[in-house]
Amino acid sequence: MSDEYFAEPARIQAGLRQMFSISSSFGSMVDDFVADVRATRDWPGQDDSFALEVIPQEQKERESCTDTSIALSEAVSGISHGTSVNLTSILSNQSNILDSIQDHRIRTNNSGKR
C-alpha cells in the first residue's frame, strides 16, 4: 500500500453534485413512467381473452421496470453517499496535514526551509 495519495476535492464535489442530480432525477423518471403506463393500461381491453392473456405479462414488465429504476436510484444514491463520506475524510486529512505544516513552520520559525 502506498504512503501517499492524491485527490482533487473540488472535482470530487463537482462529481457528487452530478451524482445527486442523477439520483434525484431517477425518482422523477419512475413517477413519469408509472403515470404514462397507467394511461395505457386499458389498451388491451378489460376482460376478453386477449386482455386476460396480455395484462398479467404487462403488469410484470411494468413492475420490473419500476423495480429496476428504483434499484438504480438507490445504487447511485449509495455511491453518492459513500463518495461524500470519502470526501469528508479527504478534506479532514488535508486540513490536518496543512495544520501540521503550519505548526512546523511556526516552531522552526523559518517557513519550513532548511
Image (spheres, rainbow, N blue to C red):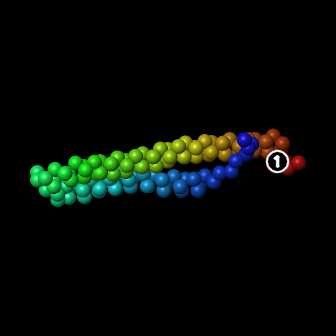
Query: Can residue 58 be seen in this snapshot?
Result: yes
Residue that carries the numbered disc 1 in the rendered image = 112
Which one is nearer the viewer's eye here, 114 or 54?
Answer: 54
Q: Where's the N terminus, which quadrant? A: top right
Residue 86 position, x and y percent, is: 58, 44
Kindly identify the residue that appears in the image at 73 percent across and 44 percent down. Answer: 2
Image-based side of 33 in relation to 97, left or right: left
Q: Amino acid at mark 1?
A: Gly
Splitting the image into 4 quarters, where does residue 104 fall? top right
Query: Can residue 66 be seen in this snapshot?
Result: no
Q: Residue furthest right?
A: 114
Which one is nearer the viewer's eye here, 101 or 55?
Answer: 55
Give the secondary structure at mark 1: loop
Kindly identify the residue that appears in the image at 67 percent across and 45 percent down. Answer: 94
Splitting the image into 4 quarters, where does residue 97 fall? top right
Kindly identify the residue that appears in the image at 79 percent across and 45 percent down. Answer: 105
Image-based side of 42 in relation to 70, left or right: left
Residue 5 position, x and y percent, is: 70, 47
Which one is nearer the viewer's eye here, 101 or 108?
Answer: 101
